[in-house]
Amino acid sequence: MHELALCQGLMAEIERVARQQQASAVQRVRVAVGALSGVEPQLLERAFHVARAGTVAGGAWLQLDVLPARVACDDCGVQAEVPANRLLCPACGTWRVRVVGGEELLLTQVELTRDAAAAQPT
Ligand SMILES: [Zn+2]
């Protein structure tokens, strides 16, 4: 299950952000998953619940945004969203297209809680 390895990578990034911001907890994590990334959103969510245990994100809520596949046509120059299982130019029908979106797995947002006592030294 490569989703778990991906989640551990995300978790390392989340922990680094939390440390930088001196956060006491992570409330919410937002991740963008491309339709062509090969990542199964349900599996990613399950893996996240495993990977977050014992971390600063132990109570964090995961929000997944699925990004559509996008292609750029080499023949007519059109750029468009297409179904992940039909990578053709929707304008002229050629298969000579380049994938320009939908392969990404990105951490887009981390919502943190700061410890009020730590943020305001007396
Ligand atoms: Zn075209």
Image: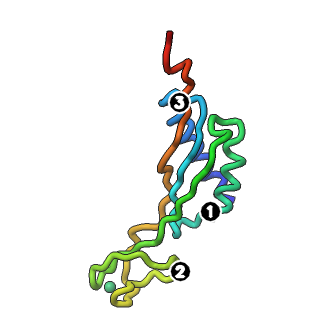
Q: Secondary structure at mark 1?
A: helix
Which label belongs to residue 19?
A: 3
Residue nearest the viewer, comparing 120 with 1: 120
* x and y percentages locating residue 96 in the rendered image: 37, 83
Q: Secondary structure at mark 3?
A: helix
Sequence-wise, the earlier of marks 3 and 1 is 3
Mark 1: few/some/many CA within 10 Å (<14, 14-19, 20+): some
Three-letter residue code for mark 1: Pro
Mark 3: few/some/many CA within 10 Å (<14, 14-19, 20+): few
Sequence-wise, the earlier of marks 1 and 2 is 1
* x and y percentages locating residue 66 in the rendered image: 53, 64
Q: Residue at horizontal 41%, vertical 72%?
A: 70
Q: Is residue 102 above or below residue 119?
A: below
Sequence-wise, the earlier of marks 2 and 3 is 3
Determine which residue is flagged by label 2: 85
Determine which residue is flagged by label 1: 41
Residue nearest the viewer, comparing 96 with 31: 31
Tell me if 72 is positioned left or right of 38 in this view: left
Instruction: Compute the Cα span from label 2 to label 3.
Output: 40 Å
User: Where's ligand 1: which quadrant?
Assistant: bottom left
Q: Quadrant of residue 58?
A: top right
Which tag is nearer the camera, tag 1 or tag 2?
A: 1
